[in-house]
Image (spheres, grey):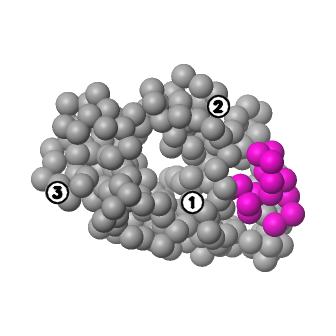
Amino acid sequence: MFAQVINAQTIVGSKHDFSAQTWNTTGEICKVCHTPHNAITLPDAPLWNHQLTTATFTTYSSATMNATVGQPDASSKLCLSCHDGTVALENFGGNTGGTHFLTGTTLLSSDLSNDHPISFTYDAALASTDGGLFNPITTPSGLGGTINANMLFSGKMQCASCHDVHNNAAGTPPSLLLKSNAASALCLTCHNK
């Protein structure tokens, strides 16, 4: 089950509005990522039209972390299909020979060891074992429901748990965040520290 849609943001004019990019020969906004027909199927992911990454990722690990972090899955794998730098931006709709790749600060690479862990189960048991996390089932997200209802995907932390890919670049909160991180508010939604 997907986290519920919180914001009524629009992709038009956002950092993910690729309609005017020269490599997007369709000129369409949604088609780079989504399609209503013949979508690539991936559990817990939307109707997907972009080539998927096949990279093997170095994931975050820490002696103090109580969660088991595996390879990125579900919607996080979709994000990484551009942000790991192995799949060209124009590789959608069955095209696989693109030459335009992400660079700069938007390029995460396949080394995620210094990024927030993703694709792990965040439940009441983890919160209890960890002691530094709130129970996602009962803790309000600040978005109209609980952490589990608004920010987790089938009980897992994913990229979209914190980032809203359809967030308007000129809007708030900034940096495609699901909500403001002023005074670490986004972080402190889950972390009890």
Amino acid beneath label 1: Gln
Regarding residue 192, the answer to whether it shows in the image is no
Instruction: Tell how many labels.
Output: 3
Closer to the N terminus: mark 3 or mark 1?
Answer: 3
Task: Examine the structure image and report whether residue 19 is included in the region drawn in magenta.
Answer: no
Q: Residue at x 51, y 27 (%)?
A: 169
Task: Describe the element under mark 1 as helix, strand or loop.
Answer: loop
Q: Is there a contact, CB below 8 Å, between mark 1 and mark 2?
A: no
Separation (CA) of disc 2 from disc 3: 34 Å
Circle 2 crowding by C-alpha within 10 Å: few under 14, some 14–19, many from 20: some
Report the residue marked by disc 3. 96
Closer to the N terminus: mark 2 or mark 3?
Answer: 3
x and y, in percent, of residue 146 in the image: 80, 57
Amino acid beneath label 3: Thr
User: Would you say the magenta stretch is mainly helix, strand or loop?
Assistant: loop
Q: Quadrant location of the N terminus?
A: bottom right
Left or right: where 37 falls relative to 143? left
Q: Quadrant of residue 58?
A: bottom left
Report the residue marked by disc 2. 173
Separation (CA) of disc 3 from disc 1: 26 Å
Segment colored magenta? 137-151
Circle 3 crowding by C-alpha within 10 Å: few under 14, some 14–19, many from 20: some
Separation (CA) of disc 1 from disc 2: 19 Å
